[in-house]
Amino acid sequence: MANKHESMHIDPYEKTWIIVSILMLAVFFGAITVAGLSFGVRVPDPVARVNPTDLQASGTFAEPGLKEVAPKRYEAYIVAQTWSFNPREITVPAGSIVKFYVTSRDVQHGFKLQNTNVNMQIVPGQVSSLAVKFDEPGEYDFICTEYCGIAHATMYGKVIVVP
Amino acid sequence: MTANTYQLTAKEKRFIGWHFIFAIAALSIGSLFGPFQAMEHAGWNFYDKFLNPIFHSYYEGLTLHGVLNALIWTTFFITGFLTFTIIYGLKRPLRYPKLNALGFWMMVVGLLIAAVPILLNQASVLYTFYPPMKAHPAFYIGVTLVVVGSWIEGYGFYLTYYQWRKENPGVRTPLISFMSLITMVMWQVATLGAAAELLVDLIPWSLGLRAGLDPQLDRTYFWWTGHPLVYFWLLPAYMSWYAFLPRQAGGKLFSDSLARFSFWLFLLLSVPVGFHHQYVDPGVPEGWKMVHSLLTYSVFFPSMLTAFTVVASLENAGRNRGGKGLLGWITKLPWNDPSVLAQLLAGILFFFGGIGGLINASYNINLVVHNTAWVPGHFHLTVATGVTLTFMGILYWLVPYLTKKPLWCKKCAVIQVWLWFIGMTIFSNAMHVVGLLGAPRRTPLGAAPYIPEEWAGHLLRVGIGGFILLISVYLFVAVMIGSLVTKKKLSEEPEPPVAESLLDPQTTPRWLDRWVPWLVGVVILLVIAYGPQLVYQISTAQFTSPPITNIFGG
Amino acid sequence: MSNEKLPDSGNEQFEHPKGAAVILAIFFLLIIILWGSVYLIMLSRGVTFYG
């Protein structure tokens, strides 16, 4: 077979498009890296393993709820189960930083704290964790965002931030 | 450059046609439920009022919608279409037609086996079937048979290609056959994850042979398959845009070599990106999420190439038809041809689907959209429009080719395509917006107690869009049935619209027609992207999640 | 990647795809605007990690 002109022909316009595309992707990647590493908009990282059928043995999830670890700094231990969160409601003063630790007793769930960046998959056997600072008083719903059975739509709780 | 005089036999046409009959049947049942979900969001709940005795719950409907549309309609259409592109491209019959028939009927048997528990509300686990929510074992077995059947059809393609290669040394693989092979190889690498999940974990566990599973590990297996699954849907649509649409529109393919290059990149980069579906998973380290984020950005690149080549090919077509000026050629495209129209409108919405996909893939930006209504809003632009509307467009020429009968009611087909475009624009835009506001996906929002007032208008638009889509899909089914049963005959055999390339494919560099280096690349990338985490997650797995079943209601 | 002359492509005039370039430029702007706006939503919703 003759291959006289065997070459990868690329139109100059297309070449420009390729360069522009790569540059754009590089800039976007830089922007999300800065947001993650410099600003602190991070995604969950492994924290701990638990046995979903024996959360009593886990210590921290034996009695779920809010724990004050320093002034205005809290840790919230929440158990997701069909079809509720335990506890359903926590109350903190404005200006608090709350670190959430959430696990599941049964199937997978979701945990999305509305109007914040806290949004986690809740997987049995794992503990999902992210933190948030509540500056404004008000009510923040946390809702289950993963299908977990017939009454999934009713599964939610709230953080009450008092002045 | 080559005269396409090759004819498929009546038997081959029938075999391909059976794929489409099952695909369209699945679509016509599965699509019934999508609009019911959309209308539920708008406050019109048909499940309780009308569907309940037969269809037990919103989630049985949602499972049917996801499984039949995303898995069955696509897989049956694609294996049928690829059978056509392999035979017609290589201009030779399948090497072992009985092997392909075996694969096909295995898919049918798998579909029927999986359908029974779904219809009995014993597999309302949605098409992601995340454990430890457990479906009836027949569901997992049926899904496995569908996948294995598609593999066997793929083996039939490979053996056919091998024979063709022996008969045609040195010839560039015809573009459509080349693209079909890449699609199938990618699929077979991609489905290894689901195969591991189903065969090692879910099937034994659902049969009681294993006490517990590690759901995090199964999510990792699942998403090994779950993301490239979308490329399995997408690549045949890209093939149509690259290799058929230019001819249908009256032009030529702008760049044969870039088309091939982008398909190699898809083979290379489609699979090692699954963690971008697991950005908010607790059991995957942040660093690995970042690595998959970078790789996902890389797989966006061949889509950018595709965008350029396809639009440039359309420009070539429009100018051949007398289009002048910078953009005047657009109006010269054959917008009244339902097949072309479907693909053009699919492409327009797919642009936006691509942008949404880039947003989803952007690491921490995923915190904004993960598991919100944004996500189904997104994939209804990609799989449900970019892919599905293109497949409909393909059937608008391929069914007349297979049956030698004219398309029944061409005008209905044109209206159908516009309705899909309009309905999906309304539906998808509303889903994206309400998702950004925080609405969860997979949730009958009419029953949710936490819905703020400001979502109402958007949820209404979700319902309206869904209703328009319901009309569109049954108009499509009507056109298909009408075309099948019509007594009219075409006077001569229609010719499949395979586009020529502006440059002779034989000038395409030889390294774009060699398999080994690329396949080695696939393995290396997978080892890098998945190796360490797979070893870690398997070696530290805790199989502590027993099956949970009593949660489907109904 | 290659500066060599284009091979003869039949009787067709080989034109640069100006119109495609325009459409893709619009697409490019849309990507920047839409991606950027969701990026800004993310920033406005605060951080998730306190050392």
Image: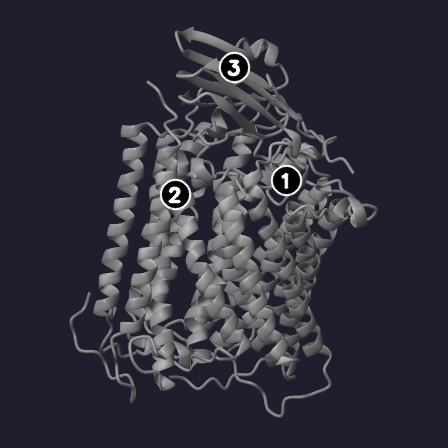
Q: Nearer the viewer, residue B40 or A58?
A: B40
Q: Is residue B62 left or right of residue A59?
A: right
Residue identified by numbered label 3: A91
Secondary element at image label 3: strand
Q: Residue A13, image x and y in percent?
A: 23, 67
Within 10 angstroms of label 1, few (less than 14), some, or many (20 or more) residues? many
Residue identified by numbered label 1: B445
For the residues carrying marks 2 and 3, which lies nearer the camera in this image? 3
Q: Residue B261, image x and y in percent?
A: 33, 62
Q: Report the chain holding disc 2.
A: C
Asked if B341 appears above or below B424 in the picture, the reply is below
Asked if A136 appears above or below B241 in the picture, the reply is above
Disc 3/disc 1 C-alpha distance (Å): 26 Å
Residue identified by numbered label 2: C38
Asked if A70 appears above or below C47 in the picture, the reply is above
Tag 2: amino acid: Val
